[in-house]
Structures are given as C-alpha cells and as structure tokens.
Amino acid sequence: MSSFPLKIVTPDGLIFDGEAERLIVRSTTGDLAIMAHHINYVTPLGMGKATVIANGKRREAACIGGMLSVVDGSVTLVPTTFEWAEKIDVARAEASLSRAEEVLHNSGSSNTDLKLAEARLHRALVRKSVAGQK
C-alpha cells in the first residue's frame, strides 16, 4: 500500500513524524480517511477517535479540535489535543465525566457552565471510548 508523509503537531509538540498508509479522523462534518495521493484539502477537526495506520500497524488516539491539511501529498494534523489510546488516563477522564454530570444535573447552572460541561462530558466520553472503557 502506498504511503504519505504525516506530521501530527499539538501545542505540546511533535507527536508523529513519518510515513503512514492511512489516517482516519473526525472533522466537524463527519469522519474521513486520508490515503496517499489525496487531493489538497483543509478541514477543521471535531472530537473523536483518530486512527493512524503506519508500517501496517494501527494506532488509535483521542483527537479533539484543530485542523487537518493535505498539501501536495503531505498531511499535517494540528489537533488541540491528541492522546494515544495507551496514554489516556482513564481515571482522570472518569473524574472529568463526573464533574461534568454534576454541573449538567444542577438546575442552578448558568448557560455558560452548561455548555462547558457538555464539552467536558464529550471529551471525557471520547477519551474513555478510545481507551477501550465504557
């Protein structure tokens, strides 16, 4: 299978720099797969699982926010947050989920607090899902 150069860069630094056969991510409009010889393309990222297939091996990660670009065959993923499945702190995700649920169940929560709690809840659910936890 053909490969393409892939860089994954977060605000914390370079996560991946190498050849990949496929990248699957969630954009704000749905899931998409990038393979070698993809047309030039730019899209904002949503919240979801990212899959990188490189050297025939599949790795999954929680990928939250950011941008994806394909320019002349080179792919750059610039997520706000990117955590490989094996590095996700499930206890931290569960604690964040609990805090979000408390705010969502509190009738005195402001609209801003509710929106922030919904986003926190979604991020925690993505992390738990990618880590293989229900």
Image: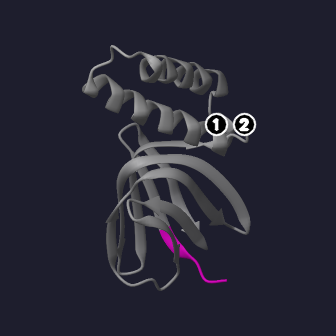
Image-quadrant location for residue 125: top right
Image-quadrant location for residue 129: top right
Q: Which residue sits at x=62%, y=34%? A: 88
Q: Is residue 134 left or right of residue 106?
A: right
The CA span between labels 1 and 2 is 5 Å
* Secondary element type, mark 1: helix
Type of residue at label 1?
Answer: Lys
Dominant secondary structure of the residues highlighted in magenta in the image: loop
Q: Position of residue 56 (x, y in %)?
A: 73, 69
Q: Nearer the viewer, residue 27 or 121?
A: 121
Q: Is residue 100 above or below residue 13?
A: above
Disc 2 target residue: 133
- Mark 1 is surrounded, within 10 Å at the Cα level, by few (under 14), some (14 to 19) or many (20 or more) other residues, namely many
Disc 1 target residue: 128
* Contact flag, marks 1 and 2 (Cβ < 8 Å): yes
Q: Which residue sits at x=41%, y=41%? A: 13
Q: Position of residue 116 (x, y in %)?
A: 34, 29
Q: Position of residue 33 (x, y in %)?
A: 53, 72
Q: Earlier in the sequence, mark 1 or mark 2?
A: 1
Q: Quadrant of the C terminus?
A: top right
Q: Is residue 41 left or right of residue 129?
A: left
Q: Which residues are magenta?
A: 1-5
Type of residue at label 2?
Answer: Gln
Question: Which mark identifies residue 58?
Answer: none
Q: Which residue sits at x=41%, y=58%? A: 77
Q: Is residue 34 above or below residue 82?
A: below
Q: Nearer the viewer, residue 9 or 88?
A: 88
Whether 4 is among the magenta residues is yes
* Secondary element type, mark 2: loop
